[in-house]
Image: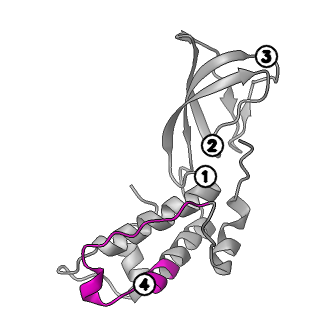
């Protein structure tokens, strides 16, 4: 699933609806690349289930934000008390120093609805990737757009401005 449907991306790029005969493969690949790059900086754009093994050392439980819900926490196969998640996506109920060992955490992170300004950042990155990777039609056929690692990718300033409120810093 995508927060920016391919037909919407086509309309954003060309100002018109796609024709029935249009090959939307390249547009779809660029949308996927843009979403991967932005989710690397801002967290998941849509609800996504994760399973992580977290080594407890008495510190806080750090998951990929924004956390929507924590489904389960197990220690050596034994179910543990699942903390609550506030409307802001911050977990509550885990006191630093209160847990040790290797925990398996299943949780859902992302956004139930992608905010309009974050979606605009995706659209602008799609436009940037389209403009900077466009080649002749014959040369484009069959190629897949790949997003470089988010940590090494320089976003255009206009994209940075749209996504700024949602960028998170990883402590890991």
Q: Position of residue 119 (x, y in %)?
A: 55, 67
Q: Residue at x 68, y 79 (%)?
A: 157
Report whether 36 appears left or right of 136.
right
Q: CA distance from mark 4 to mark 2?
A: 31 Å
Per the image, label 3 sits on a secondary structure element best described as loop
Label 1 CA crowd tier, 10 Å (few <14, some 14–19, many 20+): many
In this rendering, the answer to whether 101 lies above or below 130 is: above
Residue at 59% x, 67% y is 116
Badge 2 density bin: few <14, some 14–19, many ≥20, Cα 10 Å: some
The answer to the question of whether label 4 and label 2 lie on touching residues, with beta carbons closer than 8 A, is no
Please identify, in this view, whether the residue under mark 4 or under mark 2 is nearer the observer.
2
Give the CA separation, mark 2 to mark 1: 7 Å
What residue does disc 1 label?
43
| 3 or 4: tag closer to the N-terminus | 4
| Label at residue 13 | 4
- C-alpha distance separating marks 3 and 4: 52 Å
User: Which is more toward the observer, 114 or 145?
Assistant: 145
Residue 64 is tagged as 2
For the magenta stretch, what is the residue range? 128-150
């Amino acid at each position: 699933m995508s927060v920016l449907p391919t037909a919407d991306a086509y309309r954003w790029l060309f100002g018109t609806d796609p024709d029935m005969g249009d090959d939307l493969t390249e547009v779809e690949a660029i949308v996927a690349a843009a979403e991967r790059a932005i989710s690397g900086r801002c967290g998941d754009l849509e609800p996504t289930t994760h399973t992580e093994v977290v080594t407890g050392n008495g510190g806080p439980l750090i998951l990929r934000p924004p956390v929507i819900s924590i489904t389960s926490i197990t220690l050596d196969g034994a179910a543990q008390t699942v903390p609550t998640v506030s409307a802001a996506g911050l977990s509550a109920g885990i006191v630093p120093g209160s847990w040790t060992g290797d925990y398996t955490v299943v949780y859902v992170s992302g956004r139930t609805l992608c905010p309009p300004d974050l979606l605009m950042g995706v659209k602008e990155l799609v436009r940037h990737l389209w403009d900077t990777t466009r080649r002749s039609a014959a040369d484009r056929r069959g190629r897949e757009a790949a997003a470089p690692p988010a940590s090494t990718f320089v976003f255009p300033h206009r994209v940075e401005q749209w996504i700024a409120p949602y960028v998170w810093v990883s402590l890991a």
